[in-house]
Amino acid sequence: YHFDLEGESLSALGKREFQGVKDADVVILLSPRGKGTHTEFGMALAWGKKVYLCHGDDSIFRRDENTSTFYCLPQVHRLVGDTEAIARQVLEG
């Protein structure tokens, strides 16, 4: 079943998002976001991409019930702050 999202089917949009992650050198994920974020995160990890996981505070990085074990992998760079602070950290890294 395909839904229309501004003239594009969800299937076509999913294919473009899939290809975007596949073609990327680096994947930047902003948290919290929608249901596709962790799918893209998993794809990026599986394809060996450098990943920046960004969140407004450190609440998902405290190694408690809010922290995924995948957030602690060496290719995942955990960034905390507002959009400007995160952009600076990505550009410097």
Image (cartoon, rainbow, N blue to C red):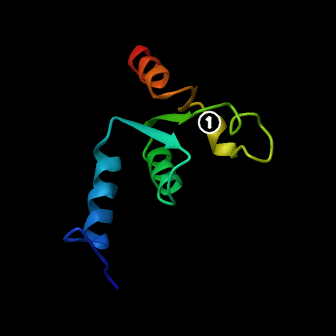
The image quadrant of residue 63 is top right
Residue 26 falls left or right of residue 30:
left
Residue shown at 70% from the left, 44% from the top: 69
Residue found at the far bottom of this picture: 1
Residue shown at 79% from the left, 47% from the top: 65
Residue shown at 30% from the left, 72% from the top: 11
Amino acid tagged 1? Leu
Residue found at the far right of this picture: 64
Residue 84 placement (x, y as % from top left): 44, 22
> Which image quadrant: the N terminus?
bottom left
Residue found at the far top of this picture: 92
Residue 90 falls left or right of residue 60:
left
Residue 2 placement (x, y as % from top left): 31, 81
Residue shown at 80% from the left, 41% from the top: 64
The foreground one among 53 and 23 is: 53
Residue 88 placement (x, y as % from top left): 43, 17
> Which image quadrant: the C terminus?
top left
The image quadrant of residue 72 is top right
Residue 62 falls left or right of residue 89:
right
Residue 62 placement (x, y as % from top left): 76, 34
Residue wearing tag 1: 73
The correct choice, above or below, for 8 with respect to 57 in the image is below
The correct choice, above or below, for 20 with respect to 63 in the image is below
